C-alpha cells in the first residue's frame, strides 16, 4: 500500500475544534462494487472519525456550522505491472526470472480536509493499493481501510 499526505505549511490547528462530512462527491468511483457499498462507506467514515477524535476534533453539534469539512474521493482503476523492472533491482518472481505481466485493480482513496470558512484545503491524505482481495473479503476490506486511514493521518496535526 502506498500512503502519503500533505498539510498546509504553518497551519494553526488550535483554530479548529469541530468537523463534519462535506457534500458527497458527485463522481462515481468507477466501479459499481464500490459506488453504493455501505460497508465500505461505514468503515471508511468510522476510521476517519476515530482519527479526527484522536487528533482533538469533535463532530459539530446538530445545526452548528463545523470548522472543518471532510471530503473523500474513491476510484478503482485497472493497472498493469510488468515485472521486468524488478530484475534491475535484483529480485524475481520465479527461478528463471521470466518477465510477467500482472493485471490488477488499484483503489485510490483521497481524503480532503477543508477550512469551512475560507474553503481552503488544509490537509490531503491519499492511499493506493490493489483491491482484488478487498472486493472478495469484507474482513480484509475493513483491515485495509483502517490501515490506509491510519497511515494517512500519521501526519495530521493535533488540535491540542
Image (cartoon, rainbow, N blue to C red):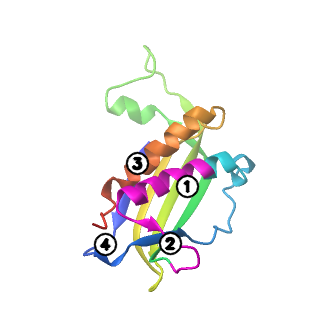
First-in-chain label (2 vs 3): 2
Residue 128 lies in magenta, yes or no? no
Stretch of the chain drawn in magenta: 42-65
Above or below residue 108? Residue 101 is above
What label sits on residue 60 in the rendered view? Answer: 2
Q: Alpha carbon of mark 2 to alpha carbon of mark 3: how far? A: 22 Å
Q: Quadrant of residue 73?
A: bottom right
Would you identify the image quadrant in which residue 72 lies? bottom right
Label 4 to label 1, Cα distance in Å?
A: 21 Å
Discs 3, 4 touching: Cβ within 8 Å = no
Name the residue carrying label 3. 150
Q: Earlier in the sequence, mark 4 or mark 2?
A: 4
Q: CA distance from mark 1 to mark 3?
A: 12 Å
Q: Which residue is at 52% across, 73% downward?
A: 61
**SS label for mark 1:** helix
Nearest to N terminus: mark 3 or mark 4:
4
Question: Mark 2 or 3, which is nearer the eye?
Answer: 2
Q: Quadrant of the N terminus?
A: top left
Q: Between residue 139 and residue 59, name the one nearer to us.
A: 59
Mark carried by residue 126: none
Residue 124, placed above or below residue 61? above
Q: Quadrant of the C terminus?
A: bottom left
Distance in Å between CA atoms under marks 2 and 1: 15 Å
Position above or below: 46 against 130:
below
Amino acid at each position: 500500500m502506498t500512503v502519503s499526505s500533505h498539510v498546509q505549511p504553518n497551519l494553526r490547528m488550535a483554530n479548529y475544534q469541530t468537523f463534519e462530512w462535506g457534500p458527497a462527491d458527485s463522481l462515481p468511483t468507477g466501479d459499481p462494487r464500490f459506488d453504493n457499498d455501505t460497508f465500505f462507506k461505514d468503515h471508511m467514515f468510522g476510521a476517519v472519525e476515530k482519527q479526527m477524535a484522536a487528533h482533538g476534533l469533535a463532530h459539530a453539534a446538530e445545526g452548528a456550522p463545523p470548522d472543518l469539512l471532510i471530503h473523500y474521493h474513491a476510484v478503482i482503476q485497472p493497472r498493469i505491472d510488468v515485472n521486468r523492472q524488478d530484475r534491475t533491482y535484483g529480485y524475481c518472481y520465479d527461478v528463471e526470472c521470466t518477465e510477467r505481466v500482472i493485471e490488477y485493480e488499484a483503489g485510490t482513496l483521497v481524503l480532503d480536509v477543508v477550512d469551512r470558512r475560507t474553503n481552503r484545503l488544509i490537509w490531503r491524505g491519499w492511499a493506493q493499493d490493489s483491491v482484488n482481495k478487498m472486493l472478495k473479503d469484507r474482513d480484509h476490506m475493513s483491515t485495509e481501510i483502517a490501515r490506509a486511514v491510519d497511515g494517512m493521518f500519521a501526519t495530521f496535526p493535533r488540535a491540542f
